[in-house]
Image: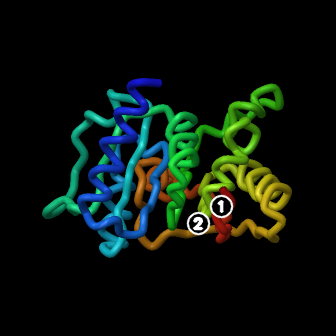
Amino acid sequence: LAHNRRAFEQSVKAWQAAGGKPLILDTGCGVGLSTLHLAQTFPDHFVIGIDQSADRLSRQIHWEGDRPANQIRVRADLVDYWRLLHAERIAPAWQYLLYPNPWPKIGHLARRWHGHPVFPIIVALGGVIECRSNWRIYIDEFAAALVQLGGIPVQTESYSPQQPITPFEAKYVASGHELWRCRVHLPASF
């Protein structure tokens, strides 16, 4: 937990130093390409990319031009990170869950974010929550869990990005996979 708290404090300090702009979480950001794309797409926000893998975060990624200054990537366990956000009453404007590992077996439900005990905290943080996957059942389950906890109707939809923002999204688009997403705006409910 100490490592996660340090990563949390480092990222919150960077966000505050940037003026406390509306916050975007890029959860499970992998190599951080999505973090850079989100920071470029939303220059009036601050993006925190979080991943548990030091290896993925250390990989060099191709990026044209200057890297946006309104972002930081940190290594932390998302369960602890979400709980620390909740404890500090920090409500992100957006939460992106892009191509999480779907854990397809029924016995792995608790490993999917919407089946994990931390899911009520994710929902309580509020903001726009967007989840994308090439696995429709994952998105359907995610949406159903959001409806159950948030009480707000959530639709799933087929999604075709104009520009892929993660390596997985680029791979799936190139191979002709159908992509799915759900997006909902939830109020913070601390």
Q: Residues within 10 Å of mark 1 (few under 14, many from 20)?
A: many
**CB within 8 Å, label 1 to label 2:** no
First reached walking from the N terminus: tag 1 or tag 2: 2
Front residue of this view, candidates 59 and 73:
73
What amino acid is labelled 2 in the image?
Gly
68 up-or-down from 30: above or below = below
Which mark is nearer the camera, 1 or 2?
2
Q: Residues within 10 Å of mark 2 (few under 14, many from 20)?
A: many
Tell me the residue at 39%/55% (across/down): 34
Residue 17 x/y as whole percent: 24, 59
Residue 25 x/y as whole percent: 46, 55
61 up-or-down from 47: above or below = above
State the residue position of label 2. Answer: 127
Disc 1 is placed on an element classified as strand
State the residue position of label 1. Answer: 180
Residue 144 x/y as whole percent: 82, 56
Is 150 situated left or right of 118 in this image? right
Report the residue that reaches farthest toward the left.
66
Front residue of this view, candidates 147 and 57:
147
